[in-house]
Amino acid sequence: MAGKVHLTKETWRVLLVRTDGPALIRLAIHVGIVLFLAVLISLQPPYWPALIILQGVVLIFLFAPLHECIHDTAFKSTWCNRLVAIVCGWLLLLPPAWFRYYHLNHHRFTNDPSRDPELTTLKPLNRRDHLIYMTGLTTWWRQLLVLLRNAFGRNRDEFIPRKAHRRITVEAALFIAAYGIAYQIFGDAVYLMWVVPALIGQPFLRAFLLAEHLNCPDARDMTVNSRTTVTNLLVRWLTWNMSFHAEHHYQPAVPFHKLPLFHQYLRPQLQVIHEGYFDLNRDHWSRLT
């Protein structure tokens, strides 16, 4: 690896140690904000539609703890990682057993056009297709199809081992049943406090995730094929430090709360760093035809 960083065993020990505390605190605040906004929306105070946008952003970035939990790094406790992944995955139509295999294959074959599952859907090359992509509607549609195929035992993804097929089928079927139960309990309120905010929030997640590997080369060097985006404290908090994406790809076992420290060690080796998500998305838009 060209961008190899040399750290002492003690430094690696500090970076790799897992604890439950930081994730419990952040998750409690994150979920607390989601629930608080849901209550406010249900009360429909003045200007309440604006709260739906805010709810959408906070809700959709539950993708961040889902991502950390499928790596088993958010918590020290395995059962905490599993439980949080299930709840967040259910809210986002993204069953974690399937997503774990999908995402770990992305790590194994980052930016490889023939083997990285994130590249099975090509990023749009013109402004019209880019706008469609950024709505997130195509993302929701693909996730719905995955859920249905899995539930009916028709998954054909090459990255899913045969031994996992039954688990993935059962998980998807239980997810669908739980959606039905939620609607029976809460009725049309699920649209106002969950479905509509999630639809509105998805473009923000698309803009965020686009930065991770956009225009990075197909290379095995993680300091080259992944991008770290320098951003403000609020974004780093909401995204559970996922902006340190090159660091995460370099060593996925580093917990989210240690990524800022790891960044200090790795930054001299990083080849792809960008200042801010707005500027990156604007620059990308300017290059489209």
Image (spheres, rainbow, N blue to C red):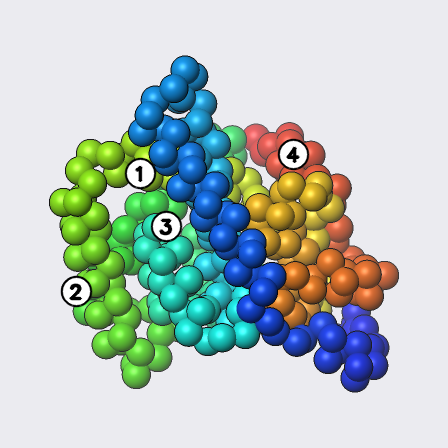
Pointers 1 and 2 in contact (C-beta within 8 Å): no
Q: Nearer the viewer, residue 69 or 1?
A: 69
Q: Nearer the viewer, mark 1 or mark 2?
A: 1
Q: Which mark is residue 165?
A: none
Q: Badge 3: few (under 14), some or many (20 or more) residues near its Cα, within 10 Å?
A: many
Query: Residue flagged by tag 1: what amino acid is it?
Result: Val
Earlier along the polypeptide chain: callout 1 or callout 2?
Answer: 2
Q: Secondary structure at mark 1?
A: helix
**Residue beneath label 1, please?**
195
Query: Residue flagged by tag 4: what amino acid is it?
Result: Phe
Residue 187 position, x and y percent, is 17, 38
Cα distance between the residues tagged 4 and 3: 24 Å
Query: Residue flagged by tag 2: what amino acid is it?
Result: Phe
Q: Which mark is residue 92?
A: 3
Residue drawn where x is 70% and y is 48% of the image: 229
Q: Is residue 129 above or below residue 156?
A: above
Q: Secondary structure at mark 3?
A: loop
Give the quarter of the figure containing the N terminus: bottom right
